[in-house]
Amino acid sequence: TVDPIAKILQKLFSLVESGKVPLETQPLMAFANPPPGNAPVFLLQNIWVGNPAGGEAFAELFTDILEPSVNTCAPLDWLEIQDVHTAMFVRENRYYLSTRSANEDALFGADALRTITMEIHKNKPKEGFLVMIAVGKGITDVPIENTSCTSLRESEVVCMVGCHVEDDDENIPAYENAKAWVKGTLVGGLGPICRRSVYTNLDNVGTEEGVKQSAYAETARERIVAVKKNMDPDNLFRFTKTR
C-alpha cells in the first residue's frame, strides 16, 4: 500500500509542474536534505502541524486521497507536549516534531525544549527531527543562533530550523531575510547550528489584498526537481533504512 503522504506528494508534484497548486494551501512546510543521505524530508503544514490556515483549500485539493479530517491530524499518530503548538509524529522509530510560536517563552523556552528532549530520549528513537519555527518577526527579533536549539548540540537529534514570515509590508525585513535564507540553504550557503542540524525555511502566506509569491514559493520548482530526483515516492522514509 502506498503511504497516503506519498500520494499527496505525488499529486503535489503534478500540480506544481502544471502550475495549478494554489498558494493558499501552503502545502510545503519544511524541506531539507539531512546528512548523510540525499532524501529530502517534507513536512506538510496542514498534516504535520494541523495549522488551520488554508486548511479548507488543502482538504478540498486532496479530498480524493485523504478525508477532510486530515487537517485535524486525526489519521496520524500524534503526541501533544505541553501547551505550546507542538506535535510529534512517530514512524519507524523516528520522531518528527514541529513547534510553532512567535514568542520566546514558547518556542525558545528552556522548559518546552527540555520536555521535548526528555520525551525523545525516553523513547530512544534511532533518529529524531526537531523543527524549530519562528513565526513572523521572530526570525529577526530572536537570533536563531541564540535559541534553545543549541542545548541539543550533543544529542542525536537532527534540528531543522526555519521561519514563517507573513507576506506583508510590516514584515519586509523578515521576509527579505527569509528569502535569502531559502536560497542560501539550497546552495549550501549556511552552516549548521548543532552538530547534526539542517537549516530550512517555510513558505509565506498570502495577504487579504491578494497572494504574492513568497520566498518559499519562488524556489518550489527547484525543490520539486530535487525531491523527484532523490526520493522514492512510494516510500518517503526509505533513507531511514540505509543510514
Image: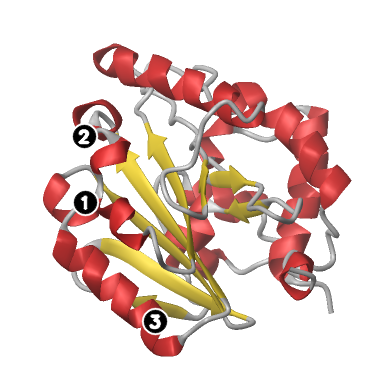
> What colour-coding does the image apply?
secondary structure
- As helix, strand or loop, the secondary structure at mark 2 comes to loop
Q: State if disc 2 and disc 1 touch (CB < 8 Å).
A: yes
Question: Which dot marks residue 116?
Answer: none
Within-10-Å neighbours for mark 2: few <14, some 14–19, many 20+? some
Q: Amino acid at mark 2?
A: Val
**Residue 16 position within the rendered picture, expressed as x and y whole percent measured from the top left:** 75, 34
In the foreground, 129 or 213? 129
Residue ID at (52%, 61%): 47
Q: Amino acid at mark 1?
A: Phe
In the foreground, 130 or 71? 130
Q: Quadrant of residue 171?
A: top left
Q: Which residue is mark 2?
A: 142
As measured in the structure, the alpha-carbon distance from the residue carrying label 2 to the one carrying label 3 is 27 Å
**156 lies above or below 126:** above
Q: Amino acid at mark 3?
A: His
As measured in the structure, the alpha-carbon distance from the residue carrying label 3 to the one carrying label 1 is 19 Å
* Residue furthest bottom as drawn: 123
**Residue 69 position within the rendered picture, expressed as x and y whole percent measured from the top left:** 51, 69
Within-10-Å neighbours for mark 3: few <14, some 14–19, many 20+? some
Q: Which residue is mark 3?
A: 121
Q: Quadrant of the C terminus?
A: bottom right
Q: Which residue is mark 1?
A: 108
Q: Quadrant of the N terminus?
A: bottom right
Of tags 3 and 1, which is closer to the observer? 3
